[in-house]
Amino acid sequence: MTITKAIDAYNSVNLKSSIEQASPHRMIQMLLEGALKRIATAKGHMQRQDRAAQGEEIGKAISIIGGLQAVLNPEKGGDVSTNLDQLYDFMASGLMEANRTGSVEKLDEIMALLVQIKSGWDAIPAEHHATTAMDKNDQPE
């Protein structure tokens, strides 16, 4: 086994373990981190004009944003949930546009929005994490 394959295997097990042990609040943080990482990677591919890898990373970022969007609960989240839903639609469209046009600026715009959302999410005090927790029939706000 090469060192690269060993590191990939370790990361895969480590990620799986992290997901299994993560609270719903932490899961959202991990999704936001993942989207930011994918967009940053896509930006590097875009700058190197590696269109195939760029498209793959942007596609993964769009999927992550779709996952964030899927757990919104308008009944509990009210206007915040509605606004996030619209913002996630905007981000997905912006990522598709960036992929089509090769716009690094559009990727930067989407990353800045995700950083703002993540900053707000990260600022929620630990004692309030339970208010964003899910039971089996519920979804976070």
Image: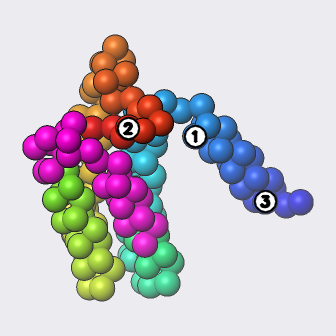
SS at circle 3? helix
Residue 125, percent from left and from top: 30, 19
Q: Tag 2: Cα neighbours inside 10 Å, few (<14), some, or many (≥20)?
A: few
Dividing the picture into quadrants, the one containing residue 104 is: bottom left
> Residue at position x 28%, y 68% from top?
92
- The reply to whether discs 3 and 2 touch (Cβ–Cβ < 8 Å) is no
Amino acid at the residue labelled 2: Asp
Q: Is residue 41 above or below residue 97?
A: above
Q: Quadrant of the N terminus?
A: bottom right
Q: Is residue 21 above or below residue 40?
A: above
Magenta stretch in the rendered image: 59-83
Residue at image mark 2: 138
Q: Is residue 7 magenta?
A: no
Closer to the chain start, of discs 1 and 3, is: 3
Q: Marks 1/3: CA distance? A: 21 Å
Q: Residue furthest front?
A: 137
- In the picture provided, is 69 more to the left or to the right than 86? right
Residue 32, percent from left and from top: 38, 47
Residue at image mark 3: 5
Q: Marks 3/2: CA distance? A: 38 Å
